[in-house]
Image: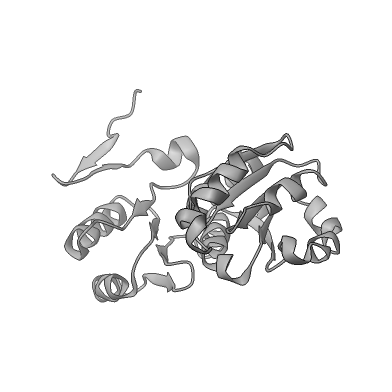
Amino acid sequence: MGHKQDLSSLGFANIDMNRKSRRGYSEAIYCLGKTREQLGSIAGQLLRNKQDLLFTKLEKDNFNYLKKLYPKFKYNALAKIGYLTGKSEVKKKGLVAVVSAGTSDIPVAEEAVLTLELMGNRVVKLYDVGVAGVHRAINNIDIIRKAKVIIVVAGMEGALASIISGLVSSPVIAVPTSCGYGASFGGLSALLAMLNCCSAGVTVVNIDNGFGAGYFASLVNR
């Protein structure tokens, strides 16, 4: 691709140092399955190359370990995201609405929100407005319609994405969550419902993937 250095190898990880120039933000790190020592080495390599840190699905004990190595490292416990940016203030642009069906869906919604904010997007949040009381979403539809792109986070039957999409002109990104009783199969029923949405203009990310939704919404908003 003409880059002098595309990858930085640590043996167990090849870090893409040109992701920021291609996509607009440094490579994010998915933390599950990685040891704290591996996370520490990855963070150090990113910082040495003047990259921002965005660590998703980061457990608190691993954050505490990283915090000792990099004192400026920050943590959002609800979103389970660790982050560090070299910018003191990011100028926010556009508008993305993040809508959650229930309170139990908020951690995944917050993962999307923080990803969006770190990538420089203006965000409006509307939580606990699901189909069990759909008037709550309808009452806020004017706010939702102002957004350039909308993220809808829902577990159970995942119906909220279809309803929101049918009321707006903006694209909708649906995020199924693993919230629900036994027959929800850990979010599979919501995922299938969203994939079978009959309202045009909805795309779907994987179960509990708030980061993926926020990242894609940022690309659309940009």
Q: Residue 82 in the image: x percent, y percent?
A: 39, 66
Residue shown at the point (41%, 64%) measured from the top left = 83
- In the image, residue 156 above or below residue 150: below
Occupied quadrant, residue 125: bottom right
Specify whether 41 is left or right of 129: left
Q: Is residue 138 left or right of residue 209?
A: right
Where residue 146 sits in the image (x, y, percent)? Answer: 81, 52
Q: How many marks?
A: 0
Name the residue located 55 percent from the left edge and 57 percent from the top edge. Answer: 112
Instruction: Name the image quarter holding the C terminus.
Output: top right
The residue lying toward the viewer, choosing from 164 and 195, is 195
Report whether residue 119 is seen. Answer: yes
Residue 93 percent coordinates (x, y): 67, 52
Extreme residue in the left direction: 11
* Left or right of 216, for residue 77: left
Residue nearer the viewer, 170 or 128: 128
Which quadrant does the N terminus fall into? top left
Question: Which residue sits at x=37%, y=38%?
Answer: 18
Q: 119 and 29: which one is in front?
A: 29
Q: Residue furthest front?
A: 183
Indicate the position of residue 33 as horizontal and vertical percent values: 25, 56
Way the structure is coloured: one colour
Residue at figure coordinates x 75%, y 42% from the top left:
170
In the rendered view, tell whether residue 15 sits above or below residue 92. above
Q: Is residue 181 above or below residue 188?
A: below
Q: Could you tell me if residue 94 is visible in this image?
A: no
